[in-house]
Image: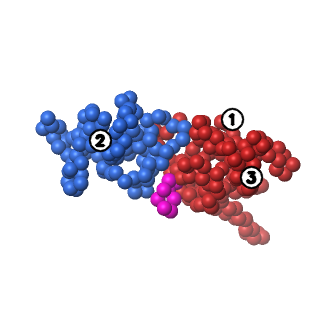
Chain colours: A red, B blue
């Protein structure tokens, strides 16, 4: 039952058990109708508006250091790799001065990504980019924000694989 | 006889069947997509749908920097075997029907009549 609870929680669902003596036990599983609505962290990097799934975000850290000084970051007695998301999105550029780092925990991996600015939390309806973007590995879709602009949803696991 | 929309892109004449055109628009903001094909200009929000914008100059390899001023997006619907209806936008830089567009007249003509 512990495994079931864990799996259901990962799908943002709930599990409930009621039991009555000599009558029986009922197990209620509640699952979201769609997995395409997710809570995200809305950040800005260069000209892009990026949404990072909040389930993968551990901590946001404010740091004021040049990029050379933070190749790795110490967090809870662990040394984490740091990824420059600006460089991953556009290899011709790189971040010179680091202000914000978002620490990500995904698939038992923990790492940090450098972002320009953290805007807010955002509940996003993820829409697919379409078949013309088949070679797109970092992005898992896009979402329309309240001001009708578009934000890109990144796949945090893909960031780790890019390096 | 079929109706076609004819437009100029960088001195070249193109035609698209009128039936395939959903809308011609010029005020949609294009959001760039990182790490994608060169000919993909980005995506736009078209009435709640996310539509890919293709620069046909880059796609057909006749790119020229001089045509960036007058741009028009033509939203094209087409069908393929995977999905019933897909939407795709061509990014048009010089358009032939500017007069007709500004007068809110459906910009179509018979391709045979064009000289």
Compared with B39, A121 (above or below) is below
CA distance for labels 2 and 3: 47 Å
Say which quadrant the C terminus of chain B sits in. top left
Badge 2 and badge 1 in a common chain: no
Q: Is residue A149 magenta?
A: yes
Circle 2 residue:
B94
* Residue A68 seen anywhere in this rendered image of the structure: yes
Q: Quadrant of residue A23?
A: bottom right
> Which chain hosts label 2?
B
Q: Position of residue A62 (x, y in %)?
A: 74, 56
Q: Report the chain holding disc 3.
A: A
In this figure, which residue is indicated by the disc labeled 1? A163
In this rendering, would A88 be left or right of A142?
Answer: right
Both marks 2 and 3 on one chain: no
The residue shown at (38%, 29%) is: B61
For the image, the number of numbered tags is: 3
Q: Secondary structure under badge 1?
A: loop
A161 over A23 or under it: above or below: above
């Amino acid at each position: 039952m512990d495994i079931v609870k864990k799996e259901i929680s990962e799908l943002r669902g709930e599990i409930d058990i009621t039991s009555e003596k000599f009558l029986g036990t009922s197990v209620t599983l509640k699952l979201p109708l769609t997995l395409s609505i997710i809570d995200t962290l809305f950040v800005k990097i260069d000209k892009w508006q990026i949404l990072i799934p909040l389930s993968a975000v551990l901590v946001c850290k404010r740091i004021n250091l040049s990029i050379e000084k933070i190749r790795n970051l110490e967090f809870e007695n662990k040394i984490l790799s740091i990824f420059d998301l600006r460089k991953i999105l556009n290899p011709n550029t790189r971040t010179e001065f680091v202000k914000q780092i978002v620490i990500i925990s995904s698939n038992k991996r923990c790492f940090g990504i450098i972002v320009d600015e953290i805007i807010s939390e955002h509940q996003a309806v993820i829409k697919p980019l379409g078949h013309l973007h088949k070679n797109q590995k970092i992005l898992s879709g896009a979402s329309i924000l309240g001001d009708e602009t578009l934000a890109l949803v990144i796949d945090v696991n893909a960031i780790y694989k890019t390096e | 006889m079929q109706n076609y929309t004819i437009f100029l892109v960088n001195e070249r004449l193109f035609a698209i069947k009128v039936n395939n055109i959903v809308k011609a628009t010029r005020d949609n903001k294009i959001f760039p997509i990182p790490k994608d094909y060169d000919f993909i200009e980005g995506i736009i929000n078209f009435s709640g749908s996310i539509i890919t914008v293709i620069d046909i100059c880059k796609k057909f390899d006749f790119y020229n920097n001089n045509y960036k001023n007058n741009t028009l997006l033509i939203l094209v619907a087409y069908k393929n075997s995977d999905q019933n209806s897909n939407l795709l936008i061509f990014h048009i830089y010089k358009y032939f029907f500017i007069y007709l567009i500004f007068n809110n007249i459906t910009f179509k003509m018979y391709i045979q009549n064009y000289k």
